[in-house]
Image: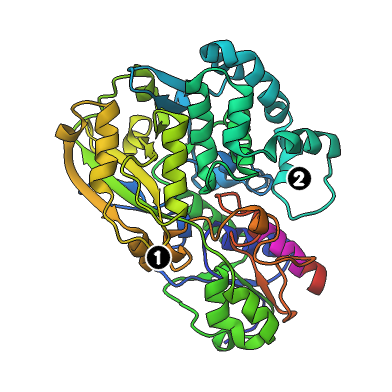
Amino acid sequence: MPGYDAIVVGAGPNGLAAAITLARAGWSVLVREARDTVGGGTRSLPLTLPGFVHDMCSAFHPLGLGSPFMRSVPLDRFGLEWVHPRFPLAHPFDDGTAGVLAQSLDETCERLGVDGPVYKALMKPLAEQWDELSADVLSPLRFPRHPFLFVRFGLAAMWPARVLAERLFRDPKTRAMFLGVAAHSFLPLEQILTASFGLVLGALAHAVGWPMARGGSQKIADALAAYLRSLGGEIATSAPVENMDELPPARAVLFDVTPRQLFRIAGHHFPDGYRRRLAGYRYGPGVFKIDLALDGPIPWAAPECALAGTVHLGSSAEEISRSERDATQGRIAERPFVLVGQQSLFDPTRAPKGQHTVWAYCHVPNGSTTDMAERIERQIERFAPGFRERIIARHTTSAVELESYNPNYVGGDINGGLQDLRQLYTRPMLRAVPYSTPDKRIYLCSSSTPPGGGVHGMCGYWAAQAALRDHG
């Protein structure tokens, strides 16, 4: 087999971003993907009935428009089109009302009433200077390029989300809505730094929105792959790698896998100390996901929910906090915090005319086999009476089944590992260059490196930059 400057193992967004970055620098690159399609967390599949397109994992992509790498690639030339719902987020309550996160900061603040002024003071500088902030937030640990803005962000981001919400917001509904956004951290909301997730995703909603890819998230991966090929890169699908030694010669090999897979595939190239640290890497809560085909839209009690791409279900700060604590402490929540996506309301390519898709999940203990479908459907029905009557097909995926589908989702953890203080910027372990390993040819480029989970490509970009510095 011919040699390459670099081989990338795994064709998720980070693996493709690493390959593109290297190809742009003039390197010859081969990507090896175990499955028959590229995509990783951005695949779309016909999970229920013919004509229904379901996103297997990620569905809404604020970082698809908001990350420095994704903004640098001309994906529109390769078929990617972004669709923006009227509202990025709605959060219904038991009284039939709903909070709204609009892309317009002013509209959001108007709807927040008494909490509008403090929300604007918190979010306006982050949203208006997102380009500058993203250069520091979406990077490995280093001295910030924009220190004053980063310190301003950090003074709020360091707090537990629950504490920040209680200190800043007077209305319990505003607190619940903020905690719902912060719950994307997969952490107990009483932990420090969980506020940072609410701030980043909130700022992104106002800076770029929470868009979806027309036709399914698969279109993101397909566009990245097409761009890579236009640069001369090669992609081999249905080409799993069980042992690094089976690969052709290369100056650098970059792995879009988690530490568990890196240990299995290339562990024999590392000293015992590094192997032990890989084995000790910690994974977070898993996900139980349900995909539904409906014969009509979800009949939300609050009309704002029918205008939102994403809907968060949890009527109080305490209910959301309890659900997230349960997932991290090995318990099953009876009233789980549920994240709902209704892509077909805004992208008619997702379902036959007059019919709709639903994408929904909740957090569960890592490795859980519990079927959460009844609990999830009960939560949706709670805020949308008559919803169950519209279900014509369902597909469920437990945390264990999610790992079987994608080995990077260890125990159903879709973030590539726990993103707490110990593993936020020091993932997979504390090193000057977290993407490098003791073997000078081997790099880790997955979401198990900074800045962590999300479809942003930055883990791959930074890993490729490390390889270019070492071997360029």
Q: Is residue 330 above or below residue 153?
A: below
Looking at the rendered structure, which numbered label has been put on residue 294? none
Residue 164: quarter of image: top right
Q: In this figure, which residue is indicated by the disc labeled 1?
A: 403
Q: Is residue 460 above or below residue 276?
A: above
Residue 388: quarter of image: top left
**Mark positioned earlier in the residue sequence (1 or 2):** 2
Q: Position of residue 6 (x, y in %)?
A: 66, 74
* Amino acid under disc 1: Glu
Residue 465 is one of the magenta-drawn residues: yes
Identify which residue is drawn at 76% across, 45% down: 136
Q: Position of residue 414 (x, y in %)?
A: 47, 56
Q: In this figure, which residue is indicated by the disc labeled 2?
A: 136
* Amino acid under disc 2: Asp
Residue 440 is one of the magenta-drawn residues: no
Report if residue 61 is visible in the image: no
Q: Which quadrant holds the C terminus?
A: bottom right
